[in-house]
Image (cartoon, rainbow, N blue to C red):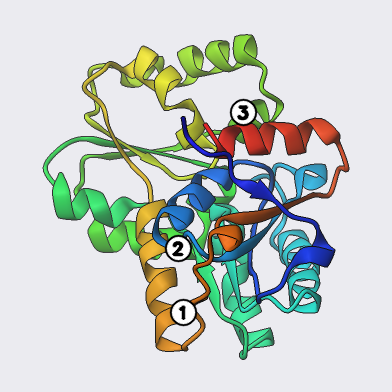
Amino acid sequence: MKKPLKQISSDKTTTRPIGIFDSGIGGVTVLKEIIKILPHEEYIYYSDSANNPYGDKQDKEIIKLCENIVKLFIERNCKAIVIACNTASAKAVKYLRKKYPNMIFIAIEPAYKMVHDYAYNEPTLVMATKGTIKSEKFNLLFHKYNNHKTYLLPCVGLADLIENGNKEELEKYLKKTLGLYKGLVKNVVLGCTHYPLIQKEIRQVLGNDIKFFNGANRLAIHLKEVLSEQNLLNNNIEEDNKEKIEFMDSSGKKEKQERFYKLLNG
């Protein structure tokens, strides 16, 4: 039986943690990949579900929300900050890196380059928030690796449905939104960290032969490389120091924490 990941409170953090944030609990999909590669680190995960979704917000508001979270992580002496939200990465990381040059920022982005590397000739659907698809950062990536067989789908409201866990509404949304692409695409780029949580439901609409691409694994590898270069890896590998995660949520709802740890250990 898989050992549950340990929960920690703020007064028990003994090493410099890694801060991870998302507009909700969807970034747990990124954290799980990071833990596979960095199992002995301590983590603070911040879910900004009170302001979810980010995808429909103006750039200035997104930047302000992100900066407030970054300030919290800096106060908590985080050694690196992972932006596990594609919209936040697209809209805010450039500003944050300039404003806080001494902080390490590792930002998720849609895994469109992976399609170029592994399935270039196959028709592809990019699922992302409207904010991500319209962002300069994504468009530079898209035009650089465009296979001219790609459909861009702004999934307005989907992250919110996943966040709230309403299965019936989610199934209706996917059938209506993805039905047009059944038999048309072979690859699906999951351009929001919430979307890997519903791969099964996406397959039910698009077919079992669909291949999924997301950037979480590559982000985790890159994070380890950067921490290693900066001599910031936690070398304390005592058994009681494994996989410590503190969860924070801006809404303060207890069910968010319960669902987060359930997904993390699932």
The residue sitting at 27% across, 57% down in the picture is: 113
- Sequence-first tag of 1 and 2: 2
- How packed mark 1 is, by other alpha carbons closer than 10 Å (few <14, some 14-19, many 20 or more), is some
Asked if residue 10 lies left or right of residue 215, the reply is right
Residue closest to the eye, 124 or 219: 219
Find residue 82 and report its horizontal and vertical position in percent.
Answer: 57, 65
Find residue 218 and report its horizontal and vertical position in percent.
Answer: 35, 60
Task: Answer yes or no: is residue 232 visible.
Answer: yes
The residue sitting at 71% across, 73% down in the picture is: 14
The residue sitting at 58% across, 53% down in the picture is: 85
Camera-nearest label, 1 or 3: 1
Label 2 amino acid? Leu
Label 2, secondary structure: give it: loop
Please give the label number shown on residue 154.
none
Label 1, secondary structure: give it: helix
Residue closest to the eye, 59 or 80: 80
- How packed mark 3 is, by other alpha carbons closer than 10 Å (few <14, some 14-19, many 20 or more), is some
Alpha carbon of mark 1 to alpha carbon of mark 3: how far? 32 Å
Residue closest to the eye, 239 or 101: 239
Find residue 161 and report its horizontal and vertical position in percent.
Answer: 65, 26
Asked if residue 174 lies left or right of residue 209, the reply is right
Task: Answer yes or no: is residue 156 visible.
Answer: no
Label 3 amino acid? Ile
Q: Mark 1 highlights which residue? A: 227
Q: Mark 2 highlights which residue? A: 38
- Is 265 located above or below residue 138 in the figure? above
- Is 208 located above or below residue 226 in the figure? above
